[in-house]
Image (tube, rainbow, N blue to C red):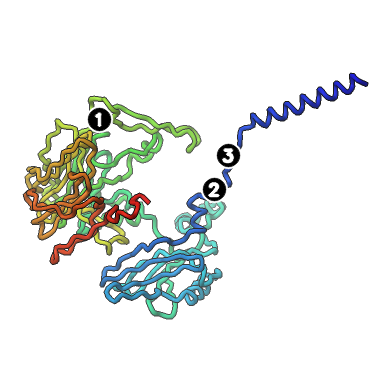
Amino acid sequence: MKHFILIILTIGFWTFSFSQESENNTTPLPNYRLAAKYSPKQLAKLVHSTSVRPHWLKNGNRFWYQYKTTEDVNYYLVDADKKSKTPLFNNEKMAKWLTEITKDPYDAKHLPKLDLKFVNKETAIRFRITSTEEILAEEDIKQTKNDSTDIKKKSKKPKMEKKTYHLEYKIGGSGLRIVDTKKKLKEDWKKWATIAPDSSIVVFSKYYNLYWMDKDNFLKAVKNEKDSTIVENQWTSDGVKNYSYGGSSRGENNESEIKNKDNRKSARVVWSHDSKKFVYQRSDTRMLKDLWVINSVAEKRPTLETYKYHMPGEQEYASSEILIFDVPSKEITKVALDTTKQINLSVYRSPRKLSNADDDFQPSTLLSKKDKIYFSTISRDRKKLDINVADINTGKVKVLIEERFNTYIEQRNLVLFNNEQEMIHWSERDGWAHFYLYDSFGRLKNQISSGSYHANSFVNIDENKRVLFFTANGVDNTKDPYY
């Protein structure tokens, strides 16, 4: 009996010790459910609109915006001159009209997010709504028409898709008009087409070289990129991999690079305002060594991304040049730069109009309208910054402003005003970030802002009153600028 009790006690002690050891050695599991509660998607259900994003219209000083609360979603039209804000439509009526057309139930508090586009001289809006009704996919309809005698294709299970309604509402009107029931066309052209400001030609990259097409052929490509009647014109012929005219393969892997080798790609040129010339910044990275990323989970087999990268201490470096292309003559002029120095180039662009933010295409244009190219060059260690100007016809360069610092130099966009006779330059030269006024020859006129605060970014300028509007941090010493 004593032996039996001893055995029981031994087993009990061993079990207790093992359980204690197991508890101590158990690695806590990650609480993915708790983390998911704070994901952007989940937080969006709790926190709605926290700011106003204005969509400026082209006529007048007006904009529209959407604002979502826990109660509902509202769309407003604001007239800044009249200081008025009115709903774009009545939510209850809109819900009723949408329900009648789509046969899906809508209510005033749960309207869908609408991607509005103003039409008819901004007297009406258009948008698309996807219903729950399923119809034969458009590509299957075309295939059925073209291959009506093909038994194999007929027996194939048809592809279905949700029906889309393209609707128009006249502001202040009493109903919706069905424009069509076609879904929005794919806009793959936005990935490669660089359109001139006057829409006369479109520039793109292909096989490492620069190509162009006229407006008529581009419109064909918008409808069908594989249209065999599209005429492409080759502009350059010396482009090679890692020293090309656009078409960067960064982000492509060993499979996608082969798959997309015949595709049109973006050239990212900067146009003159009259569309007669454009500027392209070409980089030569052929001498740099390769770096790799192995993607082991995205595809069935791992893929390899190879790209050029300059590691610290390596003697080789990428060289850059600015090329000027003349549209009528097809001539190419090189901007006179010292390629023996390792520099980073940045061509200044003109700020885009707020009323153009929702346009289908927004061409990048040069900062100057007077045959000048303003650009910056900064050293590899970012301790030397030069603001330069080049003649767009000859390529000759003049240094306007020099910044030298013992630490990293920040930079902002250059501002031209007063018919390009004056410039506003942002600098941290006095220990604080401030704006400085220069003439067009690069001569300092005066410091515009000053004090123990950080002038952050340019907003606008009233040229008549010569008043600068800008954002700043730390102006009020009673407030924490980092809060």
Does the residue at mark 1 contact the one at mark 2 (Cβ under 8 Å)?
A: no
Residue 197 versus residue 394 in the image, above or below: below
Measuring 57% from the left and 43% from the top, which residue is drawn there? Answer: 32
Kindly indicate the quadrant of the structure image that contains residue 126.
bottom left
Query: Which residue is farthest right?
Result: 1
Residue tagged 3: 30
Calculate the distance from the C-alpha at mark 1 to the C-alpha at mark 2.
44 Å
Measuring 31% from the left and 59% from the top, which residue is drawn there? Answer: 360
> Which of the pair 124/407 is nearer the observer?
407
Q: What's under tag 3, amino acid-wise?
A: Pro
Q: Earlier in the sequence, mark 1 or mark 3?
A: 3
> Which of the pair 141/151 is nearer the observer?
141
Query: Which residue is farthest front?
Result: 478
Measuring 27% from the left and 74% from the top, which residue is drawn there? Answer: 81
Q: What's under tag 2, amino acid-wise?
A: Ala
Q: Nearer the viewer, mark 1 or mark 2?
A: 2
The numbered dot on residue 286 is: 1
Calculate the distance from the C-alpha at mark 1 to the C-alpha at mark 3.
45 Å
